[in-house]
Amino acid sequence: MNPHIQTLLVASIGEQQTSNLVNLLHISAKFDHVQPGQVTRAEIAQALNMLLFYGILQRVPSGKTYTDELVAHGGKVTLDHGALRTVRWFGIGALPPGEAAVTRILKPLGYRLNGKYPLDRLNMTGRSYAQVDDPENISQFFVSELHPERFSPAFQQAVSRVLGDSKDPLTPAAFSLLNELERDGSLSVQQALELLPVLVACFDRQHGTPQLSDYELLIKESAEMAWIATEGNVFNHATDRVADVFQTAEEQKALGRSIKAQVEVSGSGRVRQTAFKADNVVREFYDAEAVLVTREVPGSFYEFISRDTMLDPVTGLSKLDLQFDTGNAQGIFKMTANA
């Protein structure tokens, strides 16, 4: 195991959970090579992805059950991508609007824009980011932005109320370390240990408890915005790259799992996706009398993807198709619409 990644993980989740996570996940052979005392951007990116996947397993019982069974049979998860939702809306507290809250973190970690996908049925835009040092083996990020200006004035006002007290978890010290990482491509071990928990905290809900009336207003026009109201910027889903997503889907159906009825197939035919329906979670709201009440709402979910290879038009070499598909994405997003 790469000692830098292991050090970062142990500091965050302890030795036993680190061991479990390392046994579960496929980790690129490129991490066998270590530069003593200098933690590369790829190593920090890998550690961040592993911790965010660990968070999914804590929040998504269906995903945890699947991965427990997988590792018990000697299998491993190949983490293909994690997805999160943002809102491109100004005046929402201290948090930068839309994907800017995320890309300011991803770019110093070596991520670059890999594709843009209009999600017009959802009034959203999706963008994928791949890690340039090892794009096929370090998990991508699929970051979507919701556009409130495409909804009603009442909806827009509710968005402003829900997100208006958002905090920015990225501290000045962490911002400085990200600048240094972007400049040099690496940090000292101590600097990486200081930075990583702040980065993890950026993938969380940054606003306070919403009003139930606002949630009910939002969900009438956008299940996706209602989801953001309760979950914020946590991973909406994490995705396991499997050899045959059709076979995986049939196996999970046979076990009685709540998996999507049909597999989504991209226009090219090279990318195929399915997912478990989102596990429900209990969240707090303020009612009309400012009393805290709870409701069961959709949380995050676990996804599966199969990717074929394609010829690189520049090099003429075979490579994994790391693109996404607008139709696939819009179909998968509906896994959190079971309010």
Image: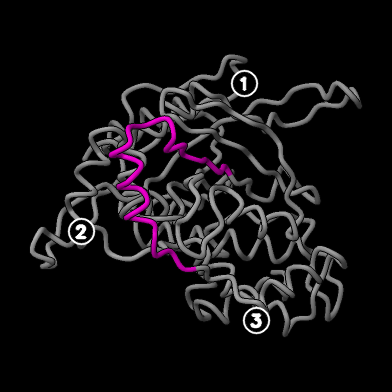
Specify few, some or many for label 2: CA neighbours under 10 Å numbering under 14, 14-19, or 20 or more: few
In the displayed image of the protein, which residue is found farthest to the left? 289
Image position of 178 (left or right of 170): right
Which residue bears the numbered disc 3? 194
In the displayed image of the protein, which residue is found farthest to the bottom? 190
* Residue 270 image label: 1
Specify few, some or many for label 3: CA neighbours under 10 Å numbering under 14, 14-19, or 20 or more: some
Tag 3: amino acid: Glu
Percent x, y of residue 161:
32, 55
Tag 1: amino acid: Arg
Image position of 32 (left or right of 51): right
The magenta region covers 142-167
Say which residue appears at 42% left-offset and 31% top-offset: 332
Q: Quadrant of the C terminus?
A: top left
In magenta segment, residue 109: no
Q: In front of the other: label 3 or label 1? A: 3
For the residues labelled 2 and 1, the Cα–Cα distance comes to 37 Å
Specify few, some or many for label 1: CA neighbours under 10 Å numbering under 14, 14-19, or 20 or more: some
